[in-house]
């Protein structure tokens, strides 16, 4: 797919990354590469047009910053030198969970004061929460830190299973690689889905994992089966959730009795085959809805069958209706079109 930048004059958006010693490198370089590719796609600079994004690294003292992996980021400027920026992105680090350093808070507060958009990657959300920016708002972070964020900042409505969330001018994302998904969503909001899709293709990444997609699916969250029989069954279901995965069929595929297969699921996964299959199908239905399918189509293609079965699965596992799920996690430009199909 090619991308044409079109005729309208490009507005350059200044994006400041808050960095500091011990920062997680990919929290910075992943989003930064998305913005770099957004400048290259269509090569607007070749015709004398402005770049879409101007990127700055901002730290308390400026200069070089040493990341947690030992690689240094060069050329950071102070908040005063950065001036007014359009977007602030606070990168994460494990030590932010134990307490955000005062200098990181000061830099974030100074940059956010006049910014149109404030974002965080992974534990960068702790800086926004400490400054009170997320009070009364929905936010997410790495699943490993979500309970700590909720416990320390009870006014924040933490949603631990989302890849990224937008609430007002604040955008938060899950851990590390989810920063790429977040930044693709920012590019889409700024310049439309065609550019975001073109950037994703250049980076050879999914375009783009929707914000409401789980940080880890049932297949990933399930521990690797200890027996070859159970591994064959789980691979079979994940590969085609909509197939006829009845207990007798699954038992026959594993060459064991239904009773023995049930014992294997209880022993290794602490659930029944039917419940595990339903959860895999729900994962698929979530993705289908976020991709724009109707409730009826999502129910059929995921293997849940009927609209009512899908709604019951959403209520049982997620505590929301499919329509409410879409309202929470679809990006705005897609939601209006999808909602019309969902409500129909």
Image: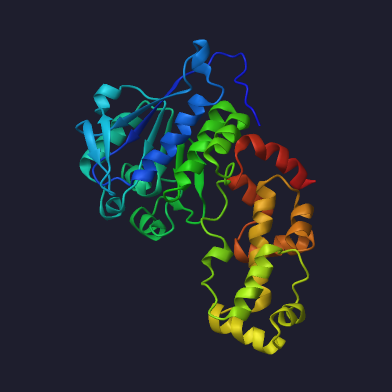
State the image coordinates of residue 192 (x, y, percent, origin top left): 60, 29
State the image coordinates of residue 234 (x, y, percent, origin top left): 63, 71
**Left or right side of 247 for 283:** left
State the image coordinates of residue 61 (x, y, percent, origin top left): 19, 32
**Residue 62 or 316: which is nearer the viewer?**
62
**Left or right side of 274 for 52:** left
State the image coordinates of residue 17 (x, y, percent, origin top left): 35, 34
136 w.r.t. 249: above or below: above
**Left or right side of 102 for 161:** right
Is residue 108 in view?
yes
**Residue 106 or 271: which is nearer the viewer?**
271
Q: Quarter of the image holding residue 302? A: bottom right
Q: How many marks?
A: 0
Q: Quarter of the image holding residue 229? A: bottom right
Q: Quadrant of the N terminus?
A: top right
The colour scheme is rainbow
Is residue 169 in view?
no
294 w.r.t. 228: above or below: above
**Left or right side of 179 for 265:** right
Check the image and name the residue furthest to the top: 48
Residue drawn at point x = 62 percent, y = 57 percent: 320
């Amino acid at each position: 797919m090619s991308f044409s930048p079109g005729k309208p004059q490009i507005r350059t958006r200044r994006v400041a990354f808050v960095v500091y010693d011990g920062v997680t490198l990919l929290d910075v370089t992943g989003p930064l590469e998305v913005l770099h590719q957004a400048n290259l796609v269509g090569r607007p600079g070749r015709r004398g047009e402005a770049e879409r994004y101007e990127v700055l690294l901002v730290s308390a003292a400026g200069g070089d910053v040493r990341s947690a992996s030992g690689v240094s980021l060069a050329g950071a400027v102070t908040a005063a030198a950065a001036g007014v920026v359009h977007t602030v992105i606070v990168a994460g680090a494990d030590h932010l969970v134990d307490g955000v350093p005062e200098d990181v808070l000061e830099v974030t507060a100074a940059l956010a004061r006049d910014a149109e958009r404030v974002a965080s990657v992974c534990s960068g959300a702790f800086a926004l929460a400490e400054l009170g920016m997320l009070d009364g708002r929905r936010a997410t972070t790495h699943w490993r830190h979500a309970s700590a964020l909720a416990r320390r900042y009870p006014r924040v409505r933490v949603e631990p299973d989302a890849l990224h969330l937008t609430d007002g001018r604040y955008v938060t994302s899950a851990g590390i690689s989810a920063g790429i998904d977040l930044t693709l969503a920012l590019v889409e909001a700024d310049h439309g889905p065609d550019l975001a899709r073109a950037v994703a293709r250049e980076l050879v990444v999914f375009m783009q994992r929707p914000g409401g997609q789980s940080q880890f699916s049932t297949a990933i969250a399930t521990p690797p089966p200890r027996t070859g029989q159970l591994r064959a069954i789980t691979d079979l279901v994940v590969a085609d959730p909509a197939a006829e995965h009845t207990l007798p069929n699954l038992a026959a595929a594993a060459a064991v009795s239904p009773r023995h297969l049930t014992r294997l699921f209880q022993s290794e996964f602490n659930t029944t085959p039917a419940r595990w299959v339903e959860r895999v199908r729900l994962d698929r239905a979530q993705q289908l809805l976020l991709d724009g399918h109707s409730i009826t189509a999502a129910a059929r293609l995921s293997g849940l069958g009927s609209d009512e079965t899908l709604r019951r699965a959403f209520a049982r596992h997620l505590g929301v209706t499919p329509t409410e799920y879409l309202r929470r996690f679809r990006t705005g430009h897609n939601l209006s079109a999808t909602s019309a199909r969902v409500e129909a």
